[in-house]
Amino acid sequence: MTETPHKRGFNHFKGTAGYIASDELMEAVNCAIALERPLLIKGEPGTGKTLLAKHIAEALGMPMESWHVKSTSKASEGLYVYDTIQRLNDARFGDGDVGDIRAYIKLGPLGRTFKAEERHVLLIDEIDKADMEFPNDLLLELDEMRFTVMETGDEISAKQRPVVIITSNNEKELPDAFLRRCIFHFIDFPDVELMKQIIGVHHPNLDAALLDQVLIKFYWLRGQNELRKKPSTSELIDWISALLRSGVTRSRLEAHIPFLGSLLKNEQDTESLLDYTSKDGSIPRRWEDLGPKFNQ
Ligand SMILES: Nc1ncnc2c1ncn2[C@@H]1O[C@H](COP(=O)(O)OP(=O)(O)OP(=O)(O)O)[C@@H](O)[C@H]1O
Ligand SMILES: [Mg+2]
């Protein structure tokens, strides 16, 4: 099917050589770009939320600014900070022109993307780390893409509206007024086919039979309900790196899960697996062993 010109104008993002996006994720990204609204991305840890912003920037050929939010972050710091300490020091030690307040206004990531000539991707990473007021305090600036520097009266208005990507690990609910302004996407945990493509990005020359054994073990582990922390995509990629470096063979992998520490990050989880195997619990070797979900 050929794309209409209108549709071609919509589909700006199709993933990159280094980032595999599902159709639904591509749709959400393109919708956010078209509507010039922030894209709010949620999903399990390690499912590529943060990395997405970098690859959107790469795909669109835009520079990127990142704002990694912490529990102590304040929304105003994303706009600018007034460096009063520096000004005080300069006044005491006679350095610089302390009369020029503008010299002490340091723009934050939002401020820098607004001021830039070139359109940017702006990542606001882990917005749920900060307090409840944080997203509310950004509503106006994200809507209107402008703010005023109180100390100087200067208005900073976005020359080009940045493509805003916001990630959340769901530690806190976000306010409705904030959600209303965003396009939302939850990154579902990748199915086997998508996971094979993601692994292909990081380990392109992996033997297909070995990959099958890796994935059988991985999806089996993730299916164990008693696990407190399920291994994620990033842990799977690390595990494969460890397996490759150790020169593991497919036949060894059939009966064992070596380097458990790169997959399980909780002593109870490790113990329960070791317990299970020491009591002659079998580890699956074939997709058929995983049940109907994996054998359609
Ligand atoms: N779709 C994907 N394509 C390529 N690599 C991926 C993808 N998803 C995850 N990865 C791999 O997983 C790693 C973790 O991704 P990232 O740091 O973006 O996860 P995250 O969702 O932000 O996790 P956290 O919630 O812990 O911050 C990446 O460095 C990359 O190696
Ligand atoms: Mg992240």
Image (cartoon, rainbow, N blue to C red):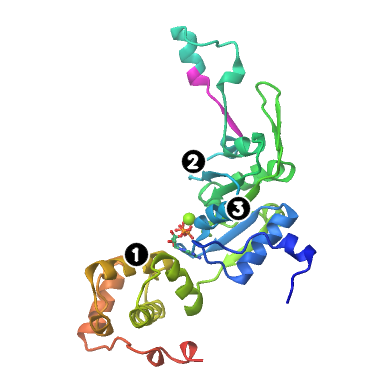
The residue at 37%/78% (across/down) is: 211
> Residue type at mark 1?
Asp
**For mark 3, what is the residue?**
165
Q: Nearer the viewer, residue 200 or 52?
A: 200
Residue occupying image coordinates x 67% and y 21%:
152
Residue 228, by quadrant, is bottom left
Measured as percent of width and height from the top left, residue 200 is found at 43, 70
Q: Are marks 2 and 1 in contact (CB under 8 Å)?
A: no
Q: Earlier in the sequence, mark 2 or mark 3?
A: 2
Q: Residue furthest front?
A: 2
Q: Which residue occupies 46% across, 62% down?
A: 45
**Sequence order check, earlier mark of 2 and 1:** 2
Residue type at the position of mark 2: Thr
Task: Tell us which disc is closer to us: 2 or 3.
Answer: 3
Where disc 2 sits, the SS reads: loop
SS type, badge 3: strand
Assign the N terminus to one quadrant of the image. Answer: bottom right
- Which comes sooner in the sequence, label 3 or label 1? 3
Task: Measure how far apart labels 2 and 3 are at the Cα level.
Answer: 20 Å
Of badges 2 and 1, the one in the foreground is 1
Give the label, 3 or 1, closer to the camera.
1
Quarter of the figure with residue 289: bottom left
The magenta-colored residue range is: 79-86
Q: In the drawing, what numbered circle is on residue 238?
A: 1
User: Looking at the rendered structure, which numbered label has been put on residue 72?
Assistant: 2
Q: Residues within 10 Å of mark 3 (few under 14, many from 20)?
A: many
In the displayed structure, would residue 75 be above or below residue 276? above
Q: Quick check: 132 above or below 95?
A: below
* Front residue (pair 194, 291): 194
